[in-house]
Amino acid sequence: MTSDDLKRKCLDGGRLSTDEALSLFETLPLCEMGWLADQRRRQIKGSAYGGQGASIVTYLVDRNINYSNVCTTGCRFCAFYRAADAPDAYVLSHSEIERKIVALEAIGGTQILLQGGHHPSLKLQDYLSLISFIKQRFPRINIHGFSAPEFHHFSEIFKETVESLLRRFKDAGLGSIPGAGAEILSDRVRRQVAPRKCTAERWIEIMRAAHEASFRTTATMMFGHIETHAERVEHLQRLRALQDDTGGFTAFICWTFQPENTLLPIQSKSGAHDYLKTLALSRLFLDNFENLQASWVTQGLRIGQLSLEFGANDFGSTMMEENVVSSAGTAFSTTVEEIESLIRQTKREPRQRDNFYNLFQ
């Protein structure tokens, strides 16, 4: 199939094969990829929000809370984790977490992203008590917490099935699950960058179990390290296949690997060109994902704004607090006012949402 045939297929809303997606990525110029992705965004979002979805860009007001930085996986791409006996290792107390959420509510926040490492000695009740405490103290705050690799870790150390753990976390007050820990869903890559984390297939299995337990989750991809372009497409294919089966993903978020202060050497850091082209490819390939978020946290606010022309329909979060990416040397921040201004400059309407893409009045 020629490039023109593939472009027509995209414009007609056709489903791309993995070979077709790879061909588009490696042959089309950036601007053409962006234009096609924007057309696909309009097709997918056109009927949302009473027919106004194509002209609306959403955002979330939330806060990342890393309840601990202790982790046993030693991922080569991570500059945040610490060994349990490190002088700066920590586990936040309930009162420390409470203060963070009070500050979030004061600015109109509606969600926390609650994540830590694979802690070797915390008990199951520690996690359940933390969730219950937050939900009882802040009933209107959605707890978007713990990742598939974390649940795999819990299952191994607590000798309980993931399905059982998901039910217990849900009963305690967990509201939704982030797509973290996916990195690249290729075992060749995972063996090199995160050999102690669960396999690609296990990540998919846990996400499937979460969807079957009525959790909505996000899906992510961290790229720009040792993966090939074909492995990026393999990652997207795994996500699309699961979404076909369950419909449980609310959004897809991709970002570039930030190498500073990590143990994963790379020849060159992925920049805006690679990010925007991969985002555009994601919009074209993930035809069953309604929402794609811009990654201004790694790319900066202006590239985040430009992402809205490359398939993204959501500006992500104000991210009142961010610790993991900033540990690797990248530290952008923003406010609601700045997000709304950037969105309006694209001639679209900014709207605050919750984690499930319901708009606020």
Image (cartoon, rainbow, N blue to C red):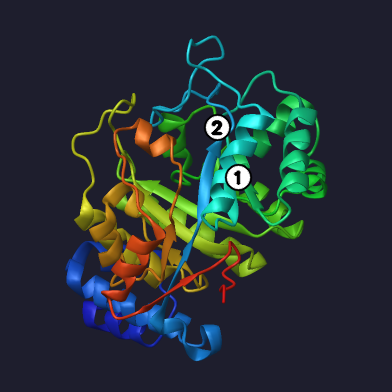
Quadrant location of the N terminus in the rendered image: bottom left
Residue 176 position (above or below residue 24) = above
| Quadrant in which residue 25 is drawn | bottom left
- For badge 2, the amino acid type reads Lys
Horizontal side, residue 31 vs residue 57: left or right: left
Disc 1/disc 2 C-alpha distance (Å) = 33 Å
Q: Tell me which label, 1 or 2, sits earlier in the chain.
A: 1
Q: Which residue is mark 2?
A: 197
Residue at position x 54%, y 58% in the image: 108
Question: Residue 45: percent from the left, percent from the top?
Answer: 46, 81
When the figure is inspected, residue 333 is found, relative to residue 294, above or below; the finding is above
Residue 259 shows in this picture: yes
Q: Is residue 67 left or right of residue 311?
A: right
Image quadrant assignment for residue 2: bottom left
Question: Which residue occupies the foreground of this view, 144 or 6?
Answer: 144
Across and down, in percent, residue 142 comes to 65, 54
Q: Nearer the viewer, residue 179 or 235?
A: 179
Does residue 330 appear to the left or right of 349 in the view shown? left
| Vertical order, 182 against 154 (above or below) | below
